[in-house]
Amino acid sequence: MGLRHTEFAWVAALLLTLPVAAAALPPSPRAAALALNADGPSSIFLNETAVYWANVTGGAPPYTFAWSVNGTAVDQNISEAFGSERFTLRPVVDSSFLVKVVVNDSLNVTAAWSKFLSVEGVSPVSVAVSGLPSTINSTVSVSATVRGGTPPYSYLWNGPGAPTGWTSVHQFTSTSLPSGTYTFGVVVRDAYGYSGSSSITVKSQVTESNGLPDLWLWVALGVTAGTAGMLALLVVRRRRAPPRL
């Protein structure tokens, strides 16, 4: 049984509207392209740690990070939903290394970054000594600041009131010092036996001691008191002298 005229017209109208409805739908947004931004040091000293970071934008998360050094995989299949990852490297030999990271998103789109790292020998040990004299209580505070090398450090001090022998003490206070010029020195040795040295000359000018006047003031007062006593003694003796006949 064929379609009646009214049914045919309704079906035809429906077919004509379908393409129009499909064309009216907005296109689905396209994801931004996968972009990788990474960086890290290009040179360090032996026994130092190099820190690298990688940030990913765009693409389709989650992301997978794969780090390698000289082509050897070190950290693989690290999945991050927010597209950020760090990698640390602590070489034990002085050489050159190629650090590389490859990132894949969930659609298997790939981005890569690499950088050469040059590792030099152990950094030299340098030390600076500072001294702060006090004019109140006859003390000098001495301290050492170390750069380079590999901790822990050992200190060998010299100077008045300094610790004796190798020690871990990096600062001390020398007490009961009269006015004068003093030299303090130190030799610093790191964990691998590398060393550095420094010294400082400090001029201590004591003006007071424990809140009391200076010693010279006491000497002056003593001389004045002694003179007054001698004058009083002379007056008394003159008054008690017997009259002459």
Image (cartoon, grey):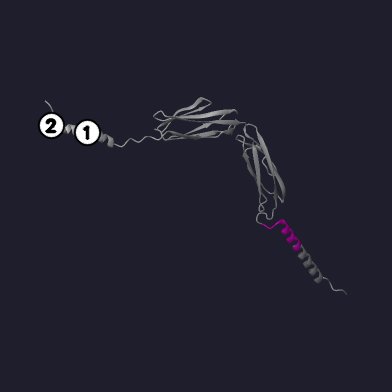
In reply to whether residue 217 is colored magenta, the answer given is yes
In reply to whether residue 213 is colored magenta, the answer given is yes
Left or right, residue 59 beside residue 21? right
Q: Quadrant of the C terminus?
A: bottom right
- Under mark 2, the amino acid is His
- Under mark 1, the amino acid is Leu
Return the x and y of residue 72 as percentages of the image width and height. Answer: 51, 24
Which residue is at a point 81% across and 70% down the rendered structure image?
Answer: 238
Q: What secondary structure is marked by label 2?
A: helix
Secondary structure predominantly adopted by residues drawn in magenta: helix
Asked whether residue 186 appears in the rendered view, the answer is no
Return the x and y of residue 21 as percentages of the image width and height. Answer: 25, 35
| Residue 225 in which image quadrant | bottom right
Number of the label disc, if any, that sits on residue 16: 1
Q: Which residues are magenta?
A: 212-224
Which residue is at a point 50% across and 29% down the rendered structure image?
Answer: 100
Nearest the eye: 206 or 120: 120
Find disc 2 in the rendering and name its residue: 5
Return the x and y of residue 10 as percentages of the image width and height. Answer: 16, 33
Left or right, residue 187 beside residue 82? right
Which residue is at a point 22% across and 33% down the rendered structure image?
Answer: 16
Asked whether residue 75 appears in the rendered view, the answer is yes
